[in-house]
Structure formats: structure tokens, C-alpha cells
Amino acid sequence: MRKISIAVPCYNEVGNVRPMAEKLTDIMKKLPYDYEIVFTDNCSTDGTKEILRELAAADRHIKVLINNRNYGVDGRSGRNTLKYVSGDAIVTIPADFQEPPERIPEFIRYWENGYKVVCGQKIGSKEGRIKYGCRNLYYKIIKGLSDTPQYEHISGITLFDKEVMTEYVKSDYDFYFRFAIADMGYDVKLIPYEQCARRSGTSSYNVWRYLTFAINSMVATSIVPLRLMTVLGLVMSVCSFLVGIVYLILKLARWHNFQAGTAPILIGMFFLGAVQLFFMGILGEYIGVILRKVTKKPEVIVGEKINFEDEETIEEHR
């Protein structure tokens, strides 16, 4: 019997994890597959961990990874979770019910028809017009900058074949899986849906986290900012040289009457200083990516594993 793994990241989802576990269990029991539901808790502080322990104790199909600290949902923690699943296909879905778990059978059908990757694609959202508009702008920018094709509004509900997951985990990709699949070149089936509001609680994502995600994805998928620095540096150098020539000519032509003053010099200095600081920040982001690669720090330290005894995982095949 083929097996489906469902990976559910969570942080402070005390009001959601139990109904999510019940919903997923009810869905999977109606399907002709073996299954496991793997909750990854990013060191919650609201009682989520205690509920997960209770759920795992009552059902061996429910497995739990509890991280030593909050490593984030989309990045390192999500990648680390994939090392512990053992299914022939892996479904990822957040615990907040914004993505529809009842669509999972549809994802599985497309997988059975030959698709290695099946992704939910948001065509609307109840998260608010401003936030959704910002997402639209972000995707337009990242598509313009990226060296590889990108999929817009790829959501948290996604299915991957074990082959894809194994290649991703073994690879040296240092960016989010939604960008890795575009670079890998697998055929992707997109399933449109409208994102719901959270069932309970509040999102742990704030403006700073969204900004960090946007910067990391830009740096990970494109070298266009580096090229822009080179081009703009060349243009500014030429402009500075031409302005200097113009000032010299005016001074020579009107030696006693031409007064340049200090204002243009100060404005130019502040402008050049701001541009340099901006570009130094971009360089710092790229250097940070290189540093993470060369130091080879562990992505995530899992403090507690529940119901993983005698299980064969992707990690064991590495």
C-alpha cells in the first residue's frame, strides 16, 4: 500500500492543531493509502506542544517534531521536516486552516495521474486587500528579477513526490522550496482556490518577517541586484565625471563670477553615501548566503521526536 505523509508546521496554534489533526485523520481514513501526519512545532509557548503530545499518544499515525527554538516555518524548519517523512508523496499544509485540507484528495489524484508536484495557487484571499496587493507586487518583482521562471501565489498546501523531496533534501539549495521547484524543472500542476481566514489565533508573520522573506528570496534566486550595482556604479561615475567637467569649464569661463558653493557638494556626498550604504546592504545579504553555506551549521535541532521509532525516513537514505 502506498503511503501519504502530511507535514503540518505550527507555532502557537493551540486552537488549531487538534481540529486539524481530526480533519486530516478523517480525510485520510477514507482514502486507500497508509498515512502519517507529521506536526513540526517551532517551540510554541501557548500549550500547543502539550496538545500535540496528547494527539500522538492517542494515534500512532500522528507524529511530532518539537524544535529547540523557533526556526521559522517556510525556511529551515520546513526543509528539516522533509527529512523525517517516509511517504511516497508528501503534502504540506499549515495548521491555521487558511488552506483547505478537504482539497487533499484532489491533489493526490493529480499525483496518481503522473504529476510530481501539485501546488495550490491562491486566486483570492480573505487576509485583506492591502496584504494581497503587496503579495501581487512582490511576485511581479521577483518574476522580473529571477533567473528562473516563478509561480505566483503558490500557497502553503502542496504535494510533492518522494523523488522530488529526496532530490531537494540532498541538494545544496539554500532557498525556499517554492523557488527550488521552478529551478528543478519538474512539471507542476496548479490548483486554484481562495484562501480562507484563520480558524483561530493570530499569524506569527509580521511586516519584518515578510520583508525578510522577500529579501531572502530575491538574493537566493537572482544576481540581478549585483549587476544593477555594477551598471549604476558605472553610470554614476560617468555622470560625476561629466558634472566635474561642466563645473571646470564654467569656472574657467567665469573665474570671478562663478560660485559653486558647498550645497551641490554636500548633496552629492549624501546621495553617494546613501547609494553606497544600500549597495553594501545588498552585498551583505549575498555574503550572508555564502556564510551559511560554508559554515555548514545544522539547519534545525529537534529536541523531541514522537512516534518515529522503527520508521524509515528520507534522512536515513542520505
Image (tube, grey):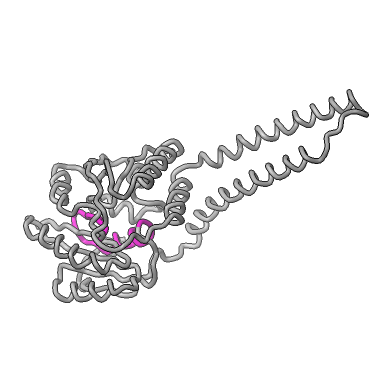
Q: Where is residue 143 in the image (x, y as percent from the top left)?
A: 41, 38
Tag count: 0
Q: Where is residue 31 in the image (x, y as percent from the top left)?
A: 8, 55
Q: Quadrant of residue 70?
A: bottom left
Q: What stretch is highlighted in magenta?
A: 74-95
Image quadrant in which the C terminus is located: bottom left
| Residue occupying the far right of the picture | 256
Q: In this view, does 266 lie above or below 40?
A: above
Q: In this view, does 195 lie above or below 11?
A: above
In reply to whether residue 75 is colored magenta, the answer given is yes
17 or 159: nearer the eye?
17
| Residue occupying the far top of the picture | 253
Taking the spot 75% from the left edge, 31% from the top edge, the residue there is 241
Q: Where is residue 148 in the image (x, y as percent from the top left)?
A: 40, 38
300 or 156: nearer the eye?
156
| Residue occupying the far front of the picture | 129
Image quadrant in which the N terminus is located: bottom left
Q: Position of residue 315 (x, y in %)?
A: 30, 63
Q: Quadrant of residue 32?
A: bottom left
Taking the spot 30% from the left edge, 45% from the top edge, the residue there is 154
Q: Is residue 34 left or right of residue 313?
A: left
In reply to whether residue 146 is colored magenta, the answer given is no
Q: In this view, does 253 lie to the left or right of 4?
A: right
Q: In which quarter of the image is residue 207?
A: bottom left
